[in-house]
Image (tube, helix red, strand yellow):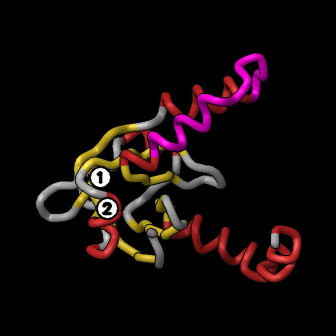
């Protein structure tokens, strides 16, 4: 399970350090793809495969299902964690998520999210006050 919030900086090659406690869960082969709310999703290959199987069950007759699958898979990138514990975030994904130098890696159970730091802080500022209301609606 991926938990916690970590603030890091991208290096000039678009690499970021993964938290040491996440590396065992993620393994050496990860997938990064477009997420929701302006972030990227980072998953272990096995977690990505499980999600891909779920998405494969969507009705192809539904134009929204087709569009979501196209965007989700077309933007996905397989990456390998290097010996220093870094991953490279491809340029098209950095650009799409508006990543600048400062990023936040946020645990989200089976996946992690990669956010531009200012976008993350803005998003959290907007939803944090709604935490209890959101919980009442979902739980």
Residue 65 sits in quarter? top right
Relative vertical location of residue 47 with respect to residue 56 in this rendering, above or below:
below
Q: Residues within 10 Å of mark 2 (few under 14, many from 20)?
A: some
Q: Is-magenta flag for residue 61?
A: yes
Residue numbers of the magenta segment: 48-64
Q: Which residue is mark 1?
A: 14
* Relative side of 76 to 126, left or right: left
In percent of width and height, residue 48 lies at 45, 44
Of residues 19 and 7, which is closer to you in this image?
19
Q: Is-magenta flag for residue 75?
A: no
Q: Residue at x 65, y 30 (%)?
A: 57
Q: Residue at x 29, y 61 (%)?
A: 16
Of residues 117 and 87, which is closer to you in this image?
87
Relative vertical location of residue 46 with respect to residue 82 in this rendering, above or below:
above
* Relative side of 21 to 56, left or right: left
Labelled pair 1, 2 in contact (Cβ < 8 Å):
yes
Residue 61 sits in quarter? top right
Does the magenta stretch mainly form a helix, a strand or a loop?
helix
Q: Which residue is mark 2?
A: 10
Q: Residue at x 26, y 74 (%)?
A: 20
In percent of width and height, residue 22 lies at 34, 69
How far apart marks 1 and 2 lie (CA) works out to 5 Å
* Relative side of 31 to 62, left or right: left
In percent of width and height, residue 28 lies at 23, 53
In percent of width and height, residue 59 lies at 73, 24
Task: Tell me the SS state at disc 1.
Answer: loop
């Amino acid at each position: 399970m991926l938990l916690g919030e970590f603030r890091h900086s991208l290096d000039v090659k678009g690499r970021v350090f993964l938290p040491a406690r996440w590396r065992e869960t993620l393994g050496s082969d990860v997938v990064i793809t477009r997420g929701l709310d302006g972030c990227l999703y980072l998953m272990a290959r096995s977690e990505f495969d499980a999600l891909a199987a779920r998405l494969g069950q969507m009705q192809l007759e539904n134009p929204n299902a087709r569009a979501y699958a196209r965007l989700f898979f077309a933007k996905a990138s397989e990456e390998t964690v290097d010996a220093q514990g870094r991953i490279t975030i491809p340029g098209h994904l950095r650009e799409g998520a508006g990543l600048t130098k400062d990023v936040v890696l946020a645990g989200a159970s089976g996946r992690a999210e990669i956010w531009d730091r200012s976008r993350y802080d803005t998003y959290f500022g907007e939803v944090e006050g709604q935490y209890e209301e959101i919980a009442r609606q979902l739980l």
